[in-house]
Every structure is written in C-alpha cells, then in structure tokens.
Image: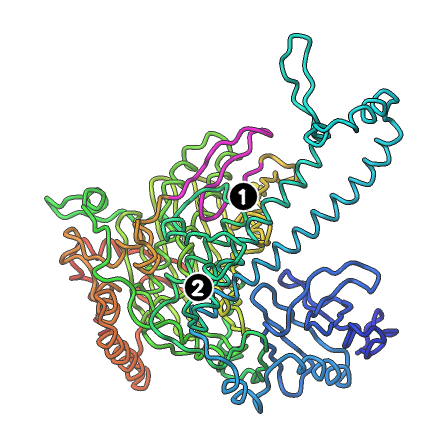
C-alpha cells in the first residue's frame, strides 16, 4: 500500500557532503503512544551521530551516537530499533533496498556477531564501575561544552550590538578624559567601568546589563563543572591504567574535587541544579552497581552492538492481556481498590479492631541484611532477549529485591492519607488536586529502585496491609496480572495491574497495562500512567517516568492532565506539571512539583500551596535495596499479624525471606522449588484460581469476604497453602 505523502520520496543516498555518510527519508515512530509513524529526514555523519528533522531545511530534533548505541532488527522486516543511553529511535524503511543501504551505513559503527569476540580480545577490559563512571563523566563534559558554546555565541552577538551603539553615543568629554589619562603612569590600573559617586561621596554601583550578567553566569557555572568533571575523568582513567602517580599530582592545571557522599542521593530538594543532579547520579552509581570485580567484554565504549530479534510466537501473541493501558514500571504495579460493601470485618467478642491495632504497632526501621548478590551481569542476561517481553524471562534471584510484586503494589499507597484529605476537600477542584497528588506520589518510592525486580508471585498468592485495608492477589500467570483493593473512611480504590517490559539494547521500555479506579462519595476517578527506564548499561541505572497521565472524573467530566516531563541535560529532573480542567475544558487550577519530592498547587506567580511532600528516605537506603521506611515494613510479621495471615500471604514465602536475610543460595533453591510446585499443579490440572477477585470485562473486581474470613480465623473459608 502506498501512502500519498511517500509517493515522491527518494531513497537514501551517499551524500556529496564529506561529513555525511548517508541521508534520506524513513518512517519514525512518534514519541507518544498510539500515534503511529511519521516521515522524518535522517542524516548519518562520519562522527557516528544519527540525527533527524522534519525535513532537510528544518533544525535537528534529536540525535543518537551510534558508537554508544545498540541496534536491533527482525529478519524479513524493514524495522530498525536504535537504543542509546538517552534516546530510542524506532524507524521503518520504505523498501528493502533502503533497509540494506541504512544497515550498511550503520554497521560502520556497530559490532556484528562475526567480530564481537575479536573486539572483546583487542580492547582493554574495564570493570563495570569504571565503564559507568567514564561514560557518565564523558557525557556530562560534552553537555557542558555545548552549553559553553551556546553562551559564548550569545555573548558575541550581544557584544557586537553593544560596541556599535556605544561608539556612536560616546561623548566628546569622555574622549578628552581618555586622552588626558592616557599619559599617566597610573592609568594602567584604571578600570573601564570605574565606580562613580554621589555628591555626598557614597559609591554608586556600576550598572551591568542583566542579560550580559546571565550569560557570564552560565559560562562560569559550566566552566567550573567542566573542570570538575575533567578532573574526575582523569582519576577514572588513572584507575584503569594503574598509573602509580595520580593525574592531578602530575601537574594538571585543574583543581581537585572531592567525591560526593551518598547522603547527597537522599536529598529531597526540589531546587537541585542540573549539574548536582548529574553528579548525584554519578555518585549513586558506585552504591548501586559495585558488587565485586565484575568485568564486561561485550559492550564496548566506542562501538555499538547489533541484535537480531525473533518474531513473536503464537503463544506470545495469545498471551497478550485483554485490557487497556495502565500504570506500572520495570517491576512496579499500581495501587488499587474496589467496592465498599462487605469491607468492615465482623469482630469476635473481645477482639480489638485490627485497623486500630495496626496503627499502634512499633515497626522495624531496617532490614536484616543489606543487598547481596551480583546484579552487574544483568546486561549479559538482557542482551539475549532484546525486543522480548521480559516478564516471560526467568532471571536469577540475585536480580531480585526481598519483596514480591504484590507487596510492591502496596508501596504505591504509602501516602493514602492524601485520599482522606480529598474526602474532606470542600470543593471539586481541591478534591481533584489531592487525587492528582496521590497519583503522583505513587511513584516516589522508585527513586532508588531501578536495579532489581520484585519476586513474581505464585498464582492465587495474596498480600494484605491492615493500615489501609489493602488486599492484593495474583489473578493471572500468563500474562502476569495483579488485582488489588484498598479502602479508608470515605474512599475506595480498586485496580488491575499488569505490564510488558522490553529491552532494546541500552534501556528498558515499560508498557503499562491496567486501570486504577478511585471512588470518593459520589465521584469516580480513573487514571493510567506510564514509565521508562533510561541509561541502563552506561552510567547509573535510573527510572525516568515520562508521558502524560490523565485523571478523569467519570461523573462530572472534570479531569487533570499530569505531564511527567522528560529529563534534559540542563533542566531539573523528575518534574511534573498538572492542569485541572472543568468538564467544558476550562483551566481551573495548576499543580507542579517533582514525583520524587513534592507537589504543590499554584496559587499565583509567587505563591504555592504544598499538597504532598515525600517522607525522607532512611539514612542507608541505598545499602538496603533503596527501600523507603514504609517499604522496609512490608515483609515484616508484626505482633498484630501472628495467627491472622492466610498461608498464601507473601510474608511466608521462604525465598523472599532468605534473600531478606542475605542468604542468596537458599533463596535460589527455594525459588526454584516454589516454581516447580506451581508447574506440577498446572500439569495435574489443579492450578489455583483467584479467591478474592473476579474478572468483570477487562478488569478484576474485589468480591469481598477477605476481612470477614480473617476475623473468623479462616475456619469457614479455608485457604490452601501454596508452598
């Protein structure tokens, strides 16, 4: 089928410009979901930079460095996926001939299967940490240089205008004074912008043009940062080559810089500069990734890699979830809820209300053991599964954290007190703002959680948290679907959560599926967020939540559109901005903030009202899997839970408990045993089914009865153990 706008498109060609290897038109997948492909003009330069624009006469919109990228294709198709540490291009060639031309050009900068082993032998073997540090520093230096060039160009333009105007307006008296002072010995100490005085002798501060001052500030900040990063890069290279003399001591003109402390990672300041943000990521790299002398051979710093993807099997196509999009991340699932009837448990005589009792329990503040095992070889596992849904791939237990995905969903309700504030709000706009703040806060716990995934629950496995009457259950195994319900005074939350995670060679793309629904009085809200993990291999692993999340009041028609902004080199990170709209589309309010810091209602240009602020992370959060203080409590069996939990609760999983206590070998053995038990049940046709949720259309809804059965000691509703 030919498209009208492609009828006159010429094939890519070798350019007459010596700097350009290949250029031409291809179809590029749009950044937003469900928007298809658009025609874009791509240019590949000899430096390995692949850039694109709307057409050759328009400025470049984005670019990728092929020597630092991973390239993947599918046999028999004209699709090419190019993934670097800061961008991902999905392009489609217009013909097989075009595909061959572009691939021949791309292969000048990537490692093919034939020469991959040779590259590993001829290049120095750098440790995982050294690769990370050198890569991130080099990236920062390039960004700083670009900022310097931009500021210098602006200065030159403004300075030329100033000179032209100042020469014309200079008075004869000033010229005479200049000539008169020219013969004085002391004139050499005279500044061009000398201070003037009032009649009483007080100094008058010289006037500096504000724009000029801003440009100078930009240059000074960028220059100091560049010096700092250059010194760090020298240290990193010194560590690689084992030079007995540090580079700073050998006469480097740049000042030495002190290493940032891990405590800086835990800062929740919303006013961090882009430089401090990048430095934070850099310093966190050692904490997150250092697990021993890990050596990397396949991923070369200046040579990209090529992967060949497999077509999806009929089983994989059949396993696609039936429901629409939703909210999730690499191993994260949303918070949820359901209907209000049958939630209040029936008490036995003399029994204390479990919800009141839960609030009086003293909970632990740290885990029995810090993170153990080696997560550095994650790339070796993922590169074998480029383009596949990683939820179907079995990973070693060393890639896990001591929580199940059911427990991860409970983390998203840590700030459920915001829903109580929404219940008490006196107007619908204020209520919508608190609901939006709650939806944004559900991402806060992921700040330091990009390196490991939660344990995949067994089918019909459950998890409860009495503090917000939370119950979650795994209701489907393939695809993995989790349903959960929570409620408080005046609100109910119900959600179905699932998702696909695909690795494109450098970063992970998370495709969330599911919907969160919230009921407050007569108002019903629903939303479906999204997420993306950037810079997985080179530099620090970190989660970048980006895209739009629309919170809709299905009763009144009002909505709040929350934009998770993509992080740039020179802007603040993790920013969100929301607009509350009436049913007619009029703007009623605006909110802004960061998903890992705080969210505020904009009152006017200079006043904000804070809606939510993150609870500070524990002091040693990085050493304890990046858990929040709330997350540390989720796998604990407190005094109020003894004899109350069903045998299917995640707290009883022996593999999770072993990993929490630092015993990786036992955790691996137990994880394998539990998975084999589930396979055996499936083979014998006695696989477990959901007990507390049932499927209604595309969603799973809580059917009630859990808290009542719990109050009766599970006597009338027996629950069979899973392990």
Residue 697 seen in render = no
Q: Percent x, y for residue 605?
A: 60, 30
Left-right relation of 9 to 425: right
Residue bearing mark 1: 555
**Left of 31 or right of it: where is 446?**
left
Q: Is residue 317 magenta?
A: no
What span is colored magenta in the figure? 590-614
Compute the Cα span from label 2 to label 1: 67 Å
Residue sitting nearer the eye, 245 or 182: 182
Pointer 2 residue: 246
Task: Check the image and name the residue furthest to the top.
Answer: 200
User: Where in the figure is residue 574, as x and y percent of width and height?
Assistant: 51, 50
Left or right, residue 152 beside residue 337? right
Q: Residue at x 65, y 62 (%)?
A: 31
Name the quadrant of the C terminus: bottom left
Front residue of 358/389: it is: 389
Mark 1 or mark 2, which is nearer the start of the sequence? 2
Label 2 SS: loop
Mark 2 or mark 1, whichever is nearer to me: 2
Q: Rate crowding at label 1 as few (under 14), some (14 to 19) or many (20 or more) other CA atoms within 10 Å.
A: few
């Amino acid at each position: 089928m030919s498209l009208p706008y492609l009828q006159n498109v010429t094939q890519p060609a070798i350019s007459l410009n010596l700097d350009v290897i290949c250029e031409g038109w291809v179809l590029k997948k749009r950044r937003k979901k469900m928007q298809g492909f658009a025609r874009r003009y791509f240019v590949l330069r000899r430096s390995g930079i692949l850039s694109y624009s709307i057409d050759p006469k328009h400025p470049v919109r984005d670019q990728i460095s092929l020597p630092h990228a991973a390239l993947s294709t599918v046999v028999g198709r004209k699709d090419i996926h190019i993934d670097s540490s800061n961008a991902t291009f999905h392009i489609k060639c217009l013909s097989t001939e075009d595909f061959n031309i572009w691939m021949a050009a791309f292969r000048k900068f990537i490692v093919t299967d034939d020469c991959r082993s040779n590259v590993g032998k001829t290049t120095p073997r750098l440790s995982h940490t050294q690769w990370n540090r050198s890569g991130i520093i080099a990236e920062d230096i390039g960004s700083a240089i670009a900022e310097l060039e931009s500021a210098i160009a602006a200065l030159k333009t403004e300075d030329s205008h100033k000179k032209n105007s100042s020469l014309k307006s200079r008075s004869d008296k000033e010229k005479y004074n200049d000539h008169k002072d020219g013969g004085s010995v002391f004139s050499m100490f005279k500044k061009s912008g000398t201070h003037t005085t009032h009649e009483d002798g007080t100094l008058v501060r010289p006037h500096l043009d504000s724009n000029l001052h801003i440009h100078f500030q930009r240059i000074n900040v960028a220059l100091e940062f560049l010096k700092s990063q250059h010194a760090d890069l020298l240290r990193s290279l010194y560590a690689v080559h084992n030079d007995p003399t540090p580079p700073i001591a050998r006469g480097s003109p740049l000042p030495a810089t002190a290493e940032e402390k891990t405590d800086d990672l835990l800062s929740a300041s919303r006013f961090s500069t882009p430089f401090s943000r990048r430095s934070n990521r850099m310093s966190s790299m050692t904490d997150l990734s250092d697990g021993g002398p890990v050596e990397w051979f396949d991923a070369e710093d200046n040579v990209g890699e090529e992967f060949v993807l497999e077509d999806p099997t009929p089983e994989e196509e059949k396993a696609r979830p039936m429901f629409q999009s939703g909210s999730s991340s690499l191993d994260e699932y949303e918070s949820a809820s359901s209907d209000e009837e049958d939630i209040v448990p029936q008490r036995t005589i003399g029994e204390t209300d479990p919800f009141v009792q839960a609030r009086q329990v003293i909970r632990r503040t740290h885990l029995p053991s810090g993170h153990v095992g080696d997560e550095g070889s994650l790339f070796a596992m993922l590169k074998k599964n480029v383009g596949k849904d990683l939820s179907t791939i079995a990973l070693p237990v060393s890639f896990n954290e001591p929580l199940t995905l059911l427990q991860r969903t409970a983390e998203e309700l840590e700030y459920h007190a915001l829903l109580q504030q929404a219940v008490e709000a006196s107007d619908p706009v204020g209520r919508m703002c608190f609901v939006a703040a709650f939806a944004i806060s559900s991402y806060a716990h992921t700040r330091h959680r990009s390196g490991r995934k939660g344990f995949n629950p067994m089918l019909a496995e459950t998890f409860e948290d009495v503090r917000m009457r939370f119950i979650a259950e795994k209701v489907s195994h393939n695809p993995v679907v989790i349903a959960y319900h929570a409620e408080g005074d005046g609100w109910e939350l119900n959600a179905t959560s699932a998702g696909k995670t695909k690795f494109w060679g450098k970063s992970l793309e998370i495709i969330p599926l599911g919907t969160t629904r919230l009921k407050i009085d007569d108002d019903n809200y629903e939303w479906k967020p999204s997420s993306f993990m950037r810079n997985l291999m080179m530099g620090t692993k970190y989660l970048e939540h980006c895209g739009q999340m629309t919170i809709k009041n299905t009763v009144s028609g009002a909505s709040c559109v929350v934009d998770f902004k993509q992080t740039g080199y020179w802007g603040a990170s993790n920013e969100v901005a929301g607009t509350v709209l009436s049913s007619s589309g009029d703007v009623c309010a605006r909110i802004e903030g960061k998903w890992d810091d705080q969210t505020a209602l904009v009152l006017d240009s200079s006043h904000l009202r804070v809606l939510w602020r993150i609870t500070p992370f524990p002091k040693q959060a990085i050493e304890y899997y990046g858990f929040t203080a709330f997350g540390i409590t989720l796998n604990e069996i407190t005094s109020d839970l003894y004899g109350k939990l069903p045998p299917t609760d995640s707290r009883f999983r022996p593999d999770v408990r072993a990993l929490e206590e630092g015993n990786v070998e036992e955790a691996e053995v137990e994880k394998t045993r539990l998975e084999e038990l589930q396979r055996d049940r499936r083979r014998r046709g006695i696989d477990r089914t959901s007990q507390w949720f049932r499927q209604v259309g595309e969603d799973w809804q809580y059917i009630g009865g859990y808290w009542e059965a719990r109050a009766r000691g599970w006597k009338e509703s027996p629950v069979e153990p899973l392990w």
